[in-house]
Amino acid sequence: MFSSVLIANRGEIAVRVIRACKELGIETIAVYSTADRDSLHVKMADRAVCIGGPAARDSYLNMSNLIAAARNLGAEAIHPGYGFLAENPHFANLCQTHGIKFIGPQADVIEALGDKAKAREIARAAGVPLVPGSDGVVHNYEEAEEIAENIGYPVIIKASAGGGGKGMRLAHSPKGLKEALITARLEAGAAFGNEDLYIEKYIEEPRHIEIQILGDETGNLIHLGERDCSIQRRNQKLLEESPSSGLDPSTREKMGQLALDTAQAAGYFSAGTVEFLVDKYGQFFFIEMNTRIQVEHPVSEMVTGVDIVKEQIRIAAGYPLSYAQEDIKIEGWAIECRVNAEDPRRNFQPSPGTIGQYIVPGGPGVRVDSSVYANYTITPYYDSMLAKVIVWGKDRPEAIQRMKRALNEYVIENIPTTIPFHLMVLDNAFFQRGEVYTNFIQRRISDER
């Protein structure tokens, strides 16, 4: 096992990785920007080092500073968390060049799966159903128009190097297609430094389902069932649950096996997710594979009992998986709500500031992954997520009631948060019946606020 791990991240995921390392007996090294000097991950780590100024490019995205910190402090491995450099193949290569283990898949696998067009080719070769669309990158409007006419409108334009809803535009007509291509290309270039786009048939009212997988370096692969991530706003996930109320046992088994086939075709190891859209008729289609730990991984941990982050670290250290597929049993129901420092009454405007009183919910089946505390100052420099509230219940109705109870206990004084918004979703009759899809917020919640 590693003697020391540097966590190249901040916030709740840095805290989560530190906890996993401590349980494995590994020394932890935190990095922080000048804006994060008082952050919880800095206080919890065994050692901590400042790596730059508040802007992410000067600190958490500064590869040379991160590598220098790891080498100077003797870290044997780097855990990238999610976001920042977690899916950057150049950073994974740099780690290898300097004799530091990158806790994640190999750089060439990250590169291949990070390009959405290449990922589609891998999935197609593995026999996974794809959303009808371009075979690869679309180079011009004429090519896009021909594809759109063949597959039928509406279509969605996506950035090949994209994620988080950036470089993504919907088109209902040839005129809309031309505008969508221009806008998506500009946004993709600005966000990812890569203007490549591809085009897909837009699936109306789909569920967003992802399969959590784990693989070791000897080729063993398992999946931990599915997560339903359909509750989204502007393509950003807000609430996730496991299992999904929309899958029957046969579809669940089929999707799990095809996720493993995709991972095997890509030569994948570490933690990752294979993501699908499921239409109203139960047909499912591959959309992408993420090569990192996901924000919503705790719901899978709650229903399987598997510590995904510890497994990820063990795999990187050369250990085989602790589980075989037959060991994985889905028990009960888990829901996660992302609590952001945003004001739902003001179009989810970010709300930085200093927290006053801070009371965390507890009791049976309640888990809170957070990096904030009383009198902590939320800065405007980073993602607005303050915490994730995760609950487990014996079934979905109990999980919903437990989440409502937990959110009503949560006190974050002085800072507007998304807690009232989540309570509105949980009280919605359609949500309670499990009738969810990716445009649920626009359809069922927007008029209520």
Image: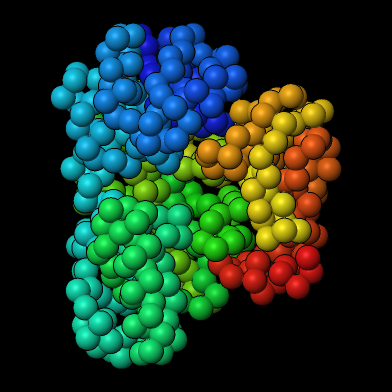
Residue at image coords 18%, 43% = 108
Q: Is residue 324 depicted above or below 71 in this figure?
A: below
Quadrant in the rendering for residue 106: top left
Quadrant in the rendering for residue 31: top left
Q: Nearer the viewer, residue 62 or 159?
A: 62
Q: Is residue 76 depicted above or below 197 in this figure?
A: above
Q: Nearer the viewer, residue 78 or 194?
A: 194
Residue at image coords 60%, 43% = 384
Q: Nearer the viewer, residue 131 or 415?
A: 415
The C terminus is located in which quarter? bottom right
Residue 372: % across, % down: 66, 28
Left or right: residue 48 compared with residue 342: left
Q: Can residue 382 be seen in this snapshot?
A: yes
Q: Is residue 324 depicted above or below 205 in this figure?
A: above
Tally of marks? 0
Q: Can residue 14 be seen in this snapshot?
A: no
